[in-house]
Amino acid sequence: MKNILFAAAFAALSAAGTAHAETIKVGVTPGPHAQIMEKVREVAAPKGLEIEILEFSDYVVPNQALADGELNANSFQHKPYLDNQVADRGFDIVSVAYTVNFPMGVYSRKAKSLDELPEGATVAIPNDPTNGGRALLILADKGLIKLKEGAGLKAGPADVAENPKNLTFAELDAAQLPRSLDDVDAAVINTNYALEAGFDPATDPIAREGEKAPYINILAVNSKDKDAAWTKTLVEAYHSEAVKAFIDETFKGSVIPAW
């Protein structure tokens, strides 16, 4: 009888634990964001939060999927990109936490430095306004071009005021930039796509941006969920020492914890 009562009590406790567990869907892009979220999932599970990870191959769909309720959260973008998406598409999406920084790099198979880029060189940059502007800001910071005053974070090729080498800018989908390197003189590539293509973002770029605060990546949710209990648990799991150690050990400086 005691064994029966113990078994019943254990079953009841197990059922109660299951009832209190919550499952959410989080959208990520392949590479570091996906790898980090796997570690976050591991940390969140004992806290009663189950995370289903869905990978998206571009920067457009994850916000639409979040807005449509197909996701509960996403982790793939920096704040300027989200701000642009909200302004353009009217999404009711908000940032709830900083995650990591991916210093963007200039890569080339034809030049070993920016000085070696020839007159009239073609430089590929992302075709979305915020990452394209970010790429141009790197080139401006390195002295290759000068942007119009007030161009800001959304600068485009039309905002180039001075272009001593007469560079041509090829605007491509961010995920396609690594594949473009055989056809262009250089490409400014987001770190997650550089890693996915087998580059070492800490050593392979011929130029690299500094750790600029506007481009720190974020966790985003629909505004109605910003104060949800699961959101708090997700942020706590992401900001754990275990996740920070995983990032440091796995990416060795090419991805930087930013909390």
Image (cartoon, rainbow, N blue to C red):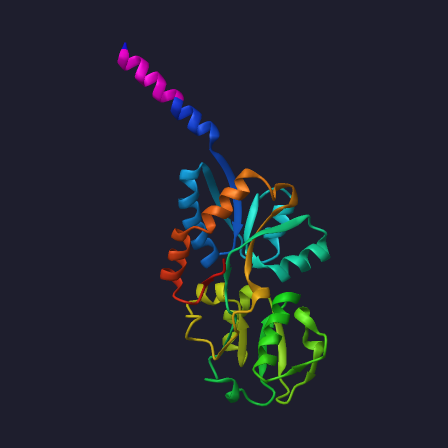
Q: Is residue 185 visible?
A: yes
| Magenta region, residue range | 2-12
Q: Nearer the viewer, residue 241 or 23?
A: 241
Q: Is residue 58 visible?
A: no
> Residue 239's spot in the image, x, y percent?
46, 51
Looking at the image, is 99 positioned above or below residue 213?
above
Outermost top residue? 1
Image height of 146 relative to 210, above or below: below
| Relative horizontal placement of residue 37, taking residue 139 as reference (left or right) | left
Q: Residue at x 65, y 86 (%)?
A: 163
- Quick one: quadrant of the N terminus? top left
x and y percent of residue 230 in the render? 53, 40
Does the stretch in magenta take in 138? no
Q: Residue at x 58, y 76 (%)?
A: 138
Above or below residue 228? Residue 241 is below
Q: Main secondary structure of the magenta part?
A: helix
Q: Taking 199 as reference, is 162 left or right?
A: right
